[in-house]
């Protein structure tokens, strides 16, 4: 009977296509908006993702997220190095500095100052040059998106000429040389990122009493970083996080204090409502149109459980097709734009499951209404002309 | 084509109804559709139920076919009483023992003619492919154009659709066939061909056939005609002439 259930469904072309379009649209909207949301949220802690070596981040107790810089005294590095279980600890500067461009305009850049000796905290991948080139006089490394985009020079015909190794920049009234181009995870602010040494970064930065943004540290082998974090808290009065905890703190800050979740959830809800109204309604109408035939099958001996399975099968078929098309279109959209634009698009398998659950819910809701109607159907209806 | 009136000795009782009542609605809106119907139908017999609209004909065949529960009286179909069966048992009983021919044919438009005919076999548990093969054979038996077997019912004429509906009612070899106005949508000539077909094929296997009709042109095909009025059977008559495809189509009845 299931083959015939499929033929009943597919045979009614207009409704079949209508249901699929509704589910595809719902699935596309839910997947795409969720993936953009996930992409944007993952950028909020991209710096933590890129600085992979340390397993402890020490910050001021008032810090709420990664970009909430509350400078520390430089001496804190030494105190942290003295805590049991700390293998090493180095300073890290992070701040916003203005770069003056060729055309006289200014561009705010995220500047990262790495420990002069070890250069720990540097970019994860170099496209040209080496991290050690930062040791050259006034050397900086620029991220490739910034180099090609906001920091690019104007060519004679209005074309943009990307920054290259050997070019110069003016960073807060200091001339610097580009010694490398790096690839980093895109940032939430979408500003160019410039890496230099800690001492140079603090020279470029506007003078303040304290300039140390973070102390990054490594627990000695065999030590639980969580335990070492507790020891640092006790010894220094500062707060220490593992990268995972710091990411979580940052993620929840943005979730709680920005309107992003509401905006994206509204779009996702819209997709869900579209799915329920268009597909659910059309599927229910499809069942109503076929009620006479369900009644006929019932009169001829088809049990309620078989009819229930037939309707569920019909709902699951349109659900699977709509889901596949929607997710496929969303993925294609993401793949197409991710390489060419700075759009944030991150589609982990969990989001695919969430979309699948949403589409399944839409289908089962539509099927439930239809099933109720068919279950209550008196087979005697077949004798009504 | 003509069949002798089934005798009590050679034909067993297919349907026995005694004092069957059925009321729709409650209170002031209650409508008593059946007011104590007594009826017997034997195997090998074609019984027609006739009477004015609203007299209870369709309600009675619905009760006999097990698609509607009666309120009172008794009604045994091949010694089975639906009232003592669960809904699922009744459904399975219908699938095995009863064939239906509907006024509006009720063929599923998205299935082919052969697939429509195969549905009772598939419902009984047969695999689709052998069921369709059997369905094609049955379609040939009812004189259906072989080239149209894969056509959708919407592409068929009324007569062709009725042949498909008859093939569907017969394909699973039911013991009782109930037909609701099988010729109402057909012209006179096609209606006669359909009735000849039903008599020939349906009764050949010693089945019982109950036909509800308003169409006086087909009375001659009946072994007995039960007249209904106001939810009661007011008389059972036997047509004067035995049914024959070559015979004059007489509507005169002997008391």
Image (cartoon, coloured by chain):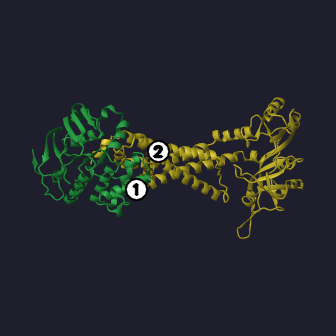
The x and y percentages for residue A383 are 28, 45
Point 66% across, 58% down: residue: A341
Q: Residue furthest bottom?
A: A157
The x and y percentages for residue A11 are 42, 56
Label 1 packing within 10 angstroms: few (<14), some (14-19), many (20+) = some
Q: Which mark is residue A312?
A: 2
Q: Is residue A131 left or right of residue A256?
A: right
Query: Spatial distance from mark 2 to mark 1, Cα to Cα?
Result: 28 Å
Point 12% across, 54% down: residue: B250
Quarter residue B68 falls in: top left
Q: Which mark is residue B12?
A: none
The chain displayed green equals B
Q: Examine the rendering and report whether any part of residue B110 can be seen.
A: no
CB-based contact (under 8 Å), mark 2 and mark 1: no
The x and y percentages for residue B181 are 23, 50
In the rendered view, tell whether residue B177 sits above or below residue A143.
above
Residue toward you, B250 or A166: B250
SS for callout 1 = helix
Point 37% across, 36% down: residue: B89
Counting the numbered discs, the total is 2
Point 79% across, 54% down: residue: A125
Q: Is residue B198 left or right of residue A115?
A: left
In the rendered view, tell whether residue B1 sits above or below residue A81.
below
Q: Chain of mark 1?
A: B
Q: Examine the rendering and report whether any part of residue A301 can be seen.
A: yes
Q: Which residue is mark 1?
A: B133
Q: Chain of mark 2?
A: A
The x and y percentages for residue A85 are 86, 34
For chain A, the rendered hue is yellow
């Amino acid at each position: 009977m299931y083959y015939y259930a499929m033929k009943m469904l597919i045979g009614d072309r207009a409704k079949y296509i209508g249901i699929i379009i509704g589910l595809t649209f719902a699935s596309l909207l839910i997947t795409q908006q969720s993936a953009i949301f996930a992409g944007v949220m993952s950028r909020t802690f991209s710096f933590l993702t890129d600085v992979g070596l340390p397993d402890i981040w020490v910050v001021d107790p008032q810090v709420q997220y990664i970009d909430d810089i509350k400078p520390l005294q430089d001496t804190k590095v030494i105190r942290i190095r003295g805590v049991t279980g700390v293998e090493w600890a180095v300073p890290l500067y992070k701040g916003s500095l203005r770069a003056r461009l060729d055309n006289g305009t200014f561009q705010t850049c995220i500047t990262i100052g790495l420990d002069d000796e070890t250069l720990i905290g540097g970019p994860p991948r170099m496209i040209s040059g080496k991290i050690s080139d930062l040791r050259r006089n006034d050397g900086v490394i620029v991220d490739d998106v910034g180099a090609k985009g906001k920091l690019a020079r104007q060519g004679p015909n209005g074309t943009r000429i990307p920054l290259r190794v050997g070019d110069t920049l003016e960073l807060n009234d200091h001339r610097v040389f580009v010694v490398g181009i790096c690839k980093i995870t895109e940032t939430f602010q979408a500003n160019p990122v410039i890496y230099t040494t800690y001492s140079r970064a603090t020279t470029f930065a506007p003078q303040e009493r304290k300039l140390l943004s973070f102390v990054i540290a490594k627990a000695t082998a065999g030590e639980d970083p969580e335990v070492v974090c507790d020891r640092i808290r006790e010894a220094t009065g500062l707060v220490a996080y593992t990268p995972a905890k710091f990411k979580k703190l940052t993620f929840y800050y943005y979730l709680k204090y920005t309107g992003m979740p509401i905006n994206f959830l509204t779009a996702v809800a819209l997709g869900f409502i579209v799915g329920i109204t268009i597909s659910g309604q059309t599927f229910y109408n499809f069942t109503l149109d076929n009620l006479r035939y369900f009644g006929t099958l019932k009169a001829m001996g088809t049990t309620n459980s078989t009819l229930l399975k037939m309707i569920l099968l019909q709902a699951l078929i349109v659900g699977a097709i709509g889901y596949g098309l929607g997710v496929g279109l969303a993925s294609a959209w993401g793949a197409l734009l991710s390489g060419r634009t700075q759009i944030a698009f991150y589609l982990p398998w969990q989001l695919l499951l969430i979309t699948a659950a949403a589409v399944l819910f839409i289908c089962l809701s539509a099927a439930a209404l239809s099933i109720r109607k068919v279950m209550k159907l008196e087979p005697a209806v077949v004798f009504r002309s | 084509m003509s069949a002798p009136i089934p005798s009590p000795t050679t034909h067993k009782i297919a349907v026995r109804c005694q004092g069957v009542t059925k009321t729709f609605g409650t209170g002031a809106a209650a409508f008593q559709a059946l007011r104590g119907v007594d009826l017997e139908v034997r195997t090998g017999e074609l019984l027609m139920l006739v009477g004015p609209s609203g007299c209870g004909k369709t309600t009675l065949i619905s009760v006999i076919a097990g698609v509607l529960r009666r309120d009172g009286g008794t009604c045994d179909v091949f010694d089975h009483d639906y009232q003592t069966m669960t809904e699922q048992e009744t459904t399975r009983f219908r699938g095995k023992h009863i064939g239906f021919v509907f006024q509006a044919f009720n063929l599923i438009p998205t299935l082919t003619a052969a697939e429509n005919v195969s549905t009772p076999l598939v419902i009984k548990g047969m695999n689709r492919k052998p069921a369709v093969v059997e369905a094609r054979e049955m379609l040939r038996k009812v004189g259906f154009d072989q080239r149209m077997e894969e056509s959708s019912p919407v592409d068929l004429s009324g007569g062709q659709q009725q042949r498909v509906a008859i093939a569907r009612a017969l394909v699973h070899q039911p013991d009782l066939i109930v037909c609701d106005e099988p010729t109402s949508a057909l012209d006179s000539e096609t209606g006669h061909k359909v009735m000849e077909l039903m008599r020939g094929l349906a009764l050949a296997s010693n089945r019982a056939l109950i036909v509800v009709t308003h169409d006086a042109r087909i009375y001659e095909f009946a072994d007995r005609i039960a007249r209904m009025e106001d939810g009661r059977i007011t008389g059972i008559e036997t047509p004067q002439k035995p049914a024959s495809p070559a015979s004059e189509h007489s509507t005169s009845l002997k008391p």
